[in-house]
Amino acid sequence: MKSKYEEILLNVRKPARYIGGEYNLPDFSVPKKVSFCLCFPDLYEVGMSNLGLQILYSILNGVKEVSCERCFAPWKDYAQQLRENNLPLASLETVKPLKDFDCLGFSIQYELGYTSLLYMLDLAGIPFRAKDRGNEFPLLIAGGPCTANPEPYADFFDLILIGDGEEFIEAFAEIVKKHKGDKLKILKEAVKLNGAYVPSLAKTENGITVTPVKKAVVKDLNLSKYPLKPLVANTEIVHDRPVVELFRGCYAGCRFCQACFFYRPIRLRNEETVVKTAEALIKSTGAEEIGFSSLSSGDYPYISGAINKVFKLASAKNVKLQLPSLRLDSYLECFSDNHRKSGLTFAPEAGTQRLRNVINKNITDSDIENTFSQAFTKGYKSVKLYFMIGLPTETDEDIEGIAKTVRNIKDIFFKTTGGKALSINVSVAVFVPKPITPFQWEEQISIAEMKRRRQLLGGLLRQIRGVHFGWHEESESFLEAVFARGGRELSYLVEKAYALGSYLDSWTELYNFSVWEKAIGELNINTSLYTARKDINARLPWDYIDFSVAKEYLKNEYEKSLKGETTKSCKGGCLLCGAEC
Amino acid sequence: MLVVKFSKTLTAVYMSHLDLMRAINRTIKRAGYEPKFSQGHNPHALLKLSPPIPVGLSSTSEYFTLAIEATDKDKFLKDLNFSAPQGLEFLKVWETEKDPGLAREIIMAEYEISGLNSPLTVELPLGQKTVRVDNYIKEYNEKHGTFLSLKNAVKTKSFVMIGEKLVEPFTAYPQA
């Protein structure tokens, strides 16, 4: 069987994606009682860059009598070879068909990946809906950022983990071991765990889930397990470096940002743990580069100490320290003179002070002025800027403000260096209202309006030399908005779109909006129900989840935003959002 | 300057030339050795590989050269093998005074191709696209009606030219 899979490797691009054999791989020569497979509905290069996958992989392989393998979505050429040779999708490590595992754990990273999940199940010969899978099929569980609202894909899974996976997965593996082969028994016991949402056991009212689920939270990151010997890919991956997670959660409170509220409470790794982890990773991977990970590393209280210490031990081994994306206002403090001056990435998000107040991006024009003058003095010659369009209360004046900000940064460059050769990348995304943010009730502008605003901005930016204008495809933002706030009924749309040919949609080459338009049309779905402004008192599809941040807090933030009032970063003092840090 | 002979088999045959370069660099670092680095804007380890081979082909005769401070060679080999990913095995190491330029000097290779019936050995010049080993196999299949693939081939020898003679690098560049 194994050799059949090997034969097709010679007929596909980048066969290293499908073969495993990475350094630090655990021993799979002896089969264990319980078999897990972590499945990632995107390519190897993307999935192997995911920290969560590495964490859960190392934890599960450390549980007695449990083994955990991996499977990534294959590129279309490999999928075609599987189909032509009648081979089911199998794991990397032991080339075991997915349908022969006890449990498959899917990572759900973005809304556009929902059809890729079905693509993997289809290739594996596994029925899509949980109700159609008996005990002869593996248990399917899901986790990841999109569990902020799992409803659109809830019917495909036996269990969805909402929140941190470290402690849950270990307890869950024990339950699977105990009741191996009996799904119902496993689910009835697992549903008692924090973070466990079992759609088939949850009560609904008018199609909306009402059985409460409390998000799983790991209390102390210093005690939680972290992969000190991560797998080292044999081929280039998107983020080809080991990372140390500094902290979870975010102090900033930008009102559009789901990660900020979803990952609260704020939990810090202390400096000692960070430095020790970095040292272990440098040794165990041999990587050329090491990085930090968090939502806003500049806000990490021990950032200068961590940078200095890790920089020192990394340099001694000829390892580069990759500085993380830092929020504009926190950047000054940790300017590292030693750092290579590649390019600066900043996210003002909006072009005017008024709109930045609305979204609570607490950056002022003088912050921009100061930071960039310093950066340019230090020798930076290229800048990447992130903005959003379609934000609540946005007018054309705010869009003009983006062009003004860009022009202003060029002027600062000229003033500080006398030069004109500044390269500016302006990357613009469309606002998507997301669950558990203060903007979860807001509307998304229509695709036609997105296009008008893009043209307006594009016209203004074209007049500035040295600017490259990058734009996120409108229809993708639209689909994200539909799925971000959709309910259980949308599983039919996911199925229909897959049947019509949608998969790996995050790859421009494969994305085709007309497939989605057709699916929406055939099912007669009124998408404006999902993109329109929601009544602030309505029951939302994800209201059954206790995210720890209180809904009242989000409401209050929303009301403040409409008045243009800002909220300070909670680094200066607790604002009682409910997360109980 | 160290010259190392190694094999590339099992899962490692699917590493591209760049992947291989990265994997060896990381193996050396994990083993606790610090090679000399190039100077310049983007310093990199002074590691050079023998000519690239097609992805999917096994080889028991690959080479790299490495600029590094003098070191216990047996221990170096042992440490490297301990830190290597699946499919890379380091076989021989010796010291030379100057870089033999293997990427340029290795001009011939020998492959063993085990067919459906009997194994056969062919000699193929490298660097000429028309007679790459994968193309040779394709032509062989057409001529003989066989279904051989790269999976049936192993590169077993690499040759450099000394005078008029083809010899394996470790004979050509004896220990310094």
Image: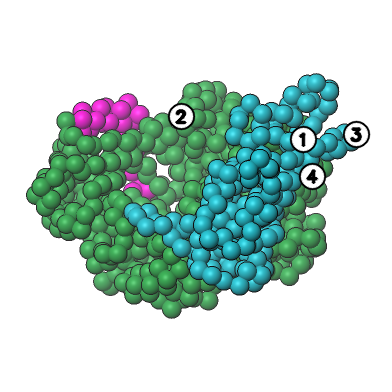
Give the residue pinned by disc 3: B117
Side of B85 relative to A311 (left or right): right
Q: Residue at x 44, y 56 (%)?
A: B44
**To which residue does mark 1 refer?**
B122
- Under circle 4, the secondary element is helix
The reply to whether dot 1 and dot 4 touch (C-beta < 8 Å) is no
Question: Magenta region: which residues?
Answer: A437-462
Q: In this rendering, would A410 be left or right of A149?
A: left
Residue type (three-letter) at the residue carrying disc 3: Asn
Task: Name the amino acid type tagged 1.
Answer: Val
Where is residue A573? Give x, y as percent: 28, 72
Between the C-alphas of marks 2 and 4, the distance is 47 Å
In magenta stretch: residue A143: no
Instruction: State whether discs 1 and 4 lie on one chain.
Output: no
Q: Is residue A317 left or right of residue B16?
A: left
Extreme residue toward the front, this view: B163
Look at mark 4 in the image and give the residue it sits on: A2
Residue kind at label 4, given as amino acid type: Lys
Which of the numbered marks, if any, corresponds to residue A526? 2
What is the letter of the green chain?
A
Q: Which chain is cyan?
A: B
Q: Chain of mark 2?
A: A
Q: Is residue B18 left or right of residue B42?
A: right
The correct choice, above or below, for A384 with respect to B67 in the image is: above
Residue at 29% x, 69% y: name it. A571
Q: Main secondary structure of the magenta part?
A: helix
Q: Which mark's residue is nearer the viewer, 1 or 4?
A: 1
On the image, the x and y values in percent for residue A306 come to 37, 72
B46 shown above or below B69: above
